[in-house]
Amino acid sequence: MSALSSPGLLGPESYELPPHSSHSNRSNTPILHSDPEKSSRTYKISFTQRLRHFTWAWYTLTMSTGGLALLIANQPNKFPGLDQIGLAVYIINLVLFAAVSSMMAARFVIHGNLIESLAHDREGLFFPTFWLSIATMITGLEKYFGDDPATAFSTTLQVLFWTYCVCTFAVAALQYSYLFSSVTYRLQTMMPSWVLPAFPIMLSGTIASVIAERQPSHSSVPIVAAGMTFQGLGFSLSFMMYSHYIGRLMESGLPCREHRPGMFICVGPPAFTALALIGMARGLPETISVMGSDDSVADGRVLEILALATGAFLWALSLWFFCVALIAVVRAPPTAFHLSWWAMVFPNTGFTLATIVLGNSFESKAIKGVGSGMSICIIAMWLFVFVNHILAVIRRDIMFPGKDEDVSE
């Protein structure tokens, strides 16, 4: 079962409400039938009916936009006004997040299907994108407002971090427990979206790497320790899923063209782990010591070197997954927009950030230049996907019966 599948793409379709039905249709969802002379673009359907198909996958928009704001804030080659542009993107993301959350709330109020959406075998896998959006907002808060020396600001970030850790650990434990007991997936159809429940807890390390450096010493060490622990948990879960993913590719071949943008999800875990390890090593206080050593300076340097070596190791894994996904998409591009297209932005944002951090660590102008070039590509891809996202809504390619993540295959 692929969580990034694309129902409703078999040909021209139309929808009609049956005048009489022997069984109830609680949502009044139109029933699909084949008609080559009609299409979803000409069929009239109310906004409330379309709102029922406003799924959790819409948070892929806000997690990608928040990641873009973080990427702009970390550029190695800056020009005047870049920080203001990044701040504007961060604020726009807050507006988008509020809009998406309002639409989701309206859906659940009108249709009363919150539990149904979380338990759905496809749509439920996208619930973690809500928490990924929260992670980008917390890191952006530090990047764009972290110069505030007030103790209250530092305390606020601590509260947000620990709350995020608790909530995302619960998501990882409870959602996988539900999937293991109540949903059956076939390994032959495994897609990287199965990793998504582990993604939010993994970004605890990314948040820790961003906020720890300017935290007081008594707070930074617990934050880094928690970030390291949960980063390891998330990456370990992802790595175990990779074995099924590679097995599926070897046995069943590449996914169909409509699913292939989701292959970029695999780029994220190694990249964000590399980014987090290097950032957390730098975020430790200068007085940190290992196993009772008296030379805190040497201990800190050793930790940074280990983090840098591990980060380079993991960066190469991300590069390999990126190349495999890129070749697959280029060979057979998708024919219609789906929210899984945002997988071509957010995981690659982590890959670009890891490249920039490695360039800064090695003090390499060449690597920094590559990071800047990758950033331009990410911005271009965000614009491309965003425009197609808007057009898809207008054309009824999404938010329409049978065409979203709330339909099982």
Image (cartoon, helix red, strand yellow):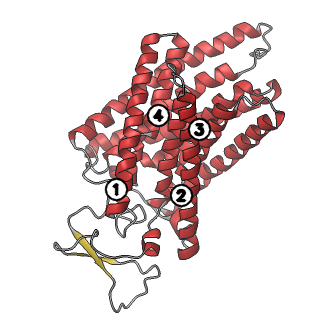
Left or right of 25 in this view: 141: right
Q: Is residue 177 visible?
A: no
- Residue 67 placement (x, y as % from top left): 52, 38
Label at residue 391: 1
Secondary structure under the numbered disc 3 in the rendered image? helix
Secondary structure under the numbered disc 2 in the rendered image? helix
Image quadrant where residue 14 sits: bottom left
Quadrant occupied by the N terminus: bottom left
Q: Determine the residue positioned at 54% across, 52% down.
A: 96
Label at residue 349: 4
Residue type beneath disc 3: Leu
Looking at the image, tell me whether mark 2 or mark 3 is earlier in sequence order.
2
- Residue 16 placement (x, y as % from top left): 30, 81
> How many labels were placed on the picture?
4
Tell us which disc is closer to us: 1 or 4: 1
Left or right of 120 in this view: 384: left
Q: Are marks 2 and 3 in contact (CB under 8 Å)?
A: no
Separation (CA) of disc 2 from disc 1:
17 Å
Secondary structure under the numbered disc 4 in the rendered image? helix
Tell us which disc is closer to us: 4 or 2: 2
Residue that carries the numbered disc 2 in the rendered image: 100
How packed mark 4 is, by other alpha carbons closer than 10 Å (few <14, some 14-19, many 20 or more), is: many
How packed mark 3 is, by other alpha carbons closer than 10 Å (few <14, some 14-19, many 20 or more), is: many
Looking at the image, tell me whether mark 4 or mark 2 is earlier in sequence order.
2
Residue type beneath disc 1: Leu
Tell us which disc is closer to us: 3 or 1: 1
Label at residue 203: 3
Q: Are marks 2 and 1 in contact (CB under 8 Å)?
A: no
Q: Determine the residue positioned at 78% across, 34% down.
A: 154
Separation (CA) of disc 4 from disc 2:
21 Å
